[in-house]
Image (cartoon, rainbow, N blue to C red):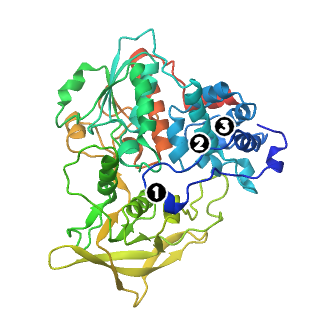
Amino acid sequence: MGKVTGFKEFERKLPAKDAPQERLKNYNEFVHSFSEEELNTQAARCMNCGIPFCHSGCPLGNVIPEFNDAVYDGKWEEAYEILSSTNNFPEFTGRICPAPCESACVLGINRSPVAIEEIEKHIAEIAYQKGFAKAKPVTVKTGKSVAVIGSGPAGLAAAAQLSKAGHDVTVYERDDKPGGLLRYGIPDFKLEKWVIDRRIDLMRQEGVVFKCNAEVGVNVPVTELKAFDAIVLAGGSTIPRNLNIPGRELKGVYFAMEFLKQQNKRVGSSPFQEEAILATGKNVLVIGGGDTGSDCVGTSNRHKAKTVTQFELMPKPPGQRTDAMPWPTYPMLLKTTTSHEEGCQRFWSINTKAFIGDDQGNLKSALVVDLAWETDALGRPVKFTEVPNSEREMPCELALLAMGFLHPQHEGLLKQLGVGLDARGNVNAAEGSYKTTVDNVFVAGDMRRGQSLVVWAISEGRECAKKVDEYLMGHSVLESKDSIAAYAF
């Protein structure tokens, strides 16, 4: 719990960041590290709250008060052992997780919550510096083999856990490097790719085999999977939500991931075949108010866009919890990201009705209209109407659609395997089993639950690995979230 009276003595503090004008000059991470004294002080804020709701707030069930206590005492190896017992990749989540654990922090009821995410990141980085984060190859093998399709956070977590259980694991990745969304969805200024490579190197040392440029069902036949005792599908939710309005076909209208993936490949010196998508000197319109939209804002500003504007169909979120979002639930509050700090005009309750092009078929503007929302008794938006006489054109030469994802890609692997789909188009799995309608095929992550957080994907990969281990061996040596939580209490 840190210092007994720490939560009364110290205020929440986050590390300093490079100034916006400086960080826009490159694609590097720009958040500084805590000093040893600052880290100790922040860990000291963790209170003896009786029931640590942060456990349930975290999809991984991280044992947070215990690792905070170890940090406060300077016991870095113990802190890393506690953290890595539930989270395979704290160096990822410490950088990019929206920290639902902090929303559930008891201290957050009437004060600022403990800076859990930053403490987690520091534990991971110190563990690498001191040599605690290292490969631990299994000496006794089971003789069983597992194919993991997709190397995003769910696939990597499943692979790491199954390797830990003694199985031979092969990961298939259709891109040129492992990482999935971590590598080709999240900008380098939030997650530099050496962080991924460092972890992949450890997994390789532990015996995990990575096959890249290998899209099963396209250039790798599905029949190749018959050689494995079990298969884990972890390909993510990759079909983006489209905006089917007049002018969608104009040059200059793209899905957000087309833009972000290409820039990440550019930074990583990886080749791409598509025509370059650049925001340089353009009026950029980002449609969608979530994290992906924010990533488009930050990337566009680094391209030196003329202007950057972000639209959101929903009304502007509140700045504080309302009756509709009581503690310890994750609140849908107004979020101003570091990308917004770098320059962005934001609009809420606005709808895009059409894209307008010039004589050459290039995007030149968007036709938009303001919306009026009706709300329920708790203030939640339920229905909108267009505001009369609010229709107008806004100039834009690049429009990026960041409105989320519908479901995984059906063509190729899923159809050829013959797995069942649910009503939303995700891969169907029996409740709590992660097992598909095909006997030895399992599914985890966004491919099963739909578009979600990286931390949820890691949790899914871990829980799925336990079910695969049970299927192969009749029992499992792997931890589950429930068993870790029971141990913590």
Which residue type carries mark 3?
Ile
Residue reaching furthest bottom? 389
Q: Which of marks 3 and 2 is in front?
A: 3
Q: Which mark is residue 17?
A: none
Q: Position of residue 25 (x, y in %)?
A: 44, 57
- Image quarter (top left, top right, bottom left or bottom right) of the N terminus: top right
Using the numbered discs, state the Cα–Cα distance from disc 3 to disc 1 in whole angstroms: 25 Å
Q: Residue 64 carries which label?
A: 3
Front position in the image: 213 or 220 = 213
Which quadrant would residue 298 be assigned to in this image? bottom left
Q: Position of residue 61 (x, y in %)?
A: 59, 36
Which residue does the numbered mark 2 point to in the structure image? Answer: 58
Residue at 35%, 70% (x, y): give it. Answer: 284
Q: Is residue 82 above or below residue 425?
A: above
Locate residue 433 relative to residue 334 in the image: left or right: left
Q: Residue 291 carries which label?
A: 1
Locate residue 209 relative to residue 153 in the image: left or right: left
Kindly state the secondary structure of the residue where label 2 is placed.
loop
Going from N to C along the chain, the mark reached first, 3 or 2, is: 2
Badges 1 and 2: C-beta atoms under 8 Å apart?
A: no
Q: Where is residue 118 in the image (x, y as percent from the top left)?
A: 61, 44
Residue at 68%, 42% (x, y): give it. Answer: 35
Badges 3 and 2: C-beta atoms under 8 Å apart?
A: yes
Using the numbered discs, state the Cα–Cα distance from disc 1 to disc 2 in whole angstroms: 19 Å
Residue at 31%, 36% (x, y): give it. Answer: 177
Q: In this view, does 137 lie above or below 175?
A: above
Kindly state the secondary structure of the residue where label 1 is placed.
helix
The 10 Å Cα crowd at callout 1, few under 14, some 14 to 19, many 20 or more, is some
The 10 Å Cα crowd at callout 2, few under 14, some 14 to 19, many 20 or more, is many
Which residue type carries mark 1?
Asp
Residue reaching furthest left? 360
